[in-house]
Image (cartoon, helix red, strand yellow):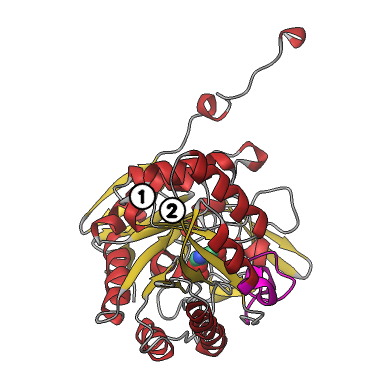
Amino acid sequence: MDHFSYSDGELSCEGVALSRIADEVGTPCYVYSTATLVRHARVLAAAFEGQDYLIAYSVKANSNLAVLATLAAEGCGADVVSGGELQRARRSGIPASKIVFSGVGKTAGEMELGLAQGIHQFNVESAAELRLLSKVASARGTQAPVAIRVNPDVAAGGHPNISTGKKGDKFGVPWAEAESLYAEAATLPGIRVVGVDVHIGSQIGDLVPMRAAFEKVVGLTRRLRDAGHQIARIDVGGGLGIPYQAGDAPAPPSAYAAMIAEVSAGLGVQVILEPGRVIAGNAGVLLTQVLFLKPAPDRTFLILDAGMNDLMRPALYGAYHRMLPLKEAAPDAPDETYDIVGPICESTDKFATERTLPALKSGDRLAMMSSGAYGAVLSSQYNARPLVPEVLVNGDSYSIIRRRPSFEEMIALEEIPDWLS
Ligand SMILES: Cc1ncc(COP(=O)(O)O)c(C=O)c1O
């Protein structure tokens, strides 16, 4: 459930009309709902009540400091994949003791940072990473708490670009090698084994593949314990899907939590969750304005002021986003079918093909729904377009939580060498 709905003919976020934000901040612009973020965090926490769990919000989904601070206030930890994300999490008030550090390519410097901060756990994805982490930790006279991310060879379903737990994916340690890597980990002076980690993909609506992966992980945990390893935590990753369009019915957090409780019953582990999309996805929208209608012989293009550089998911994964006019259309308003595109010089700069909407004209504004996760974080300045502002609504008021940079700010890191000036 989210807090975006029509009220008196105006699409609103909580108590604020999105037209007001579009007028005052300009478009394109991301808008997030505090009540929705909080609700999603609480629903997940309530689902796991009674289990020993840690919600480590996956910062990659939406890493704005104000979003992180909102979730920190709800008691969330963080799943980070870079030194930058780690610093964002810490700056937003997330304690190091609730941070897990994932990712296939951590540098020695990033390991140093994690150790210096005293994070909860490193999720290690290869033998080479494990050895380097041991070296870095030993040099500091400490041991790194480690879970090894295993690749269970389970297909997550959904889009192949966001499937991560199949043999051949770059993620995790191949299933057949996991136990020998744990054996090596036990011999490394800078490593303290604490758990097992898995993450099979994103936007997974069906619990069957998740269950298959977690059952394998529970079996592995028992074998590792028999071999003398202290496995006190299972990190189940993220991946729970959200509804993007009518008819989508992903498994709810309650069913997900019940499945995990059942699979891990009697194991006595802390369950670490790394949810991203399920918390942030439906808590945000991208506001955009129709620049032009461009009739072509076989279709009409609706050209928006938002492009793939602002919201990359459709170009990257063919993702679907609902589009709602900020002014509610009259019930008898005529419909039109459009190809909806942005202003970027790429053919993939397309948000929808043959999408039927209430007839629109230049200047009308739309919200691209469900854009709170993997939206702003994937944006770029391609075509020298400024990063879009981000706004956080809280009840009847809002705050700009990232402003639009000026042209001077956009070029501030660049230099023209002397020989050219
Ligand atoms: C290791 C890891 N954890 C958590 C997540 C968050 O996934 P989601 O946003 O689908 O919950 C991802 C994203 O793919 C990931 O790679």
Q: Secondary structure at mark 1?
A: strand
List the residue tagged with mark 1.
Answer: 391
User: Which tag, 2 or 1, sits closer to the chain's start?
Assistant: 2
Q: Is residue 50 left or right of residue 284?
A: left
User: In the image, which residues are magenta?
Assistant: 157-179
List the residue tagged with mark 2.
Answer: 30
Name which quarter of the figure residue 26 lies in: top left
Asked if the residues shown at circle 2 and circle 1 are in contact, with their CB atoms under 8 angstroms apart, the answer is yes
Confirm or reject: label 2 Cβ below 8 Å from ligand 1. no
Q: Please tell me which residue is depicted at 52% across the width and 53% down the height of the picture.
A: 81
The vertical placement of 207 against 70, above or below, is: below
The reply to whether residue 313 is visible in this rendering is yes
Name which quarter of the figure residue 216 lies in: bottom right
The vertical placement of 125 against 22, above or below, is: below
Residue 74, which numbered label? none
Q: Position of residue 214 (x, y in %)?
A: 51, 83
Query: How far apart, in angstroms, are the residues tagged by discs 2 and 1?
Result: 6 Å
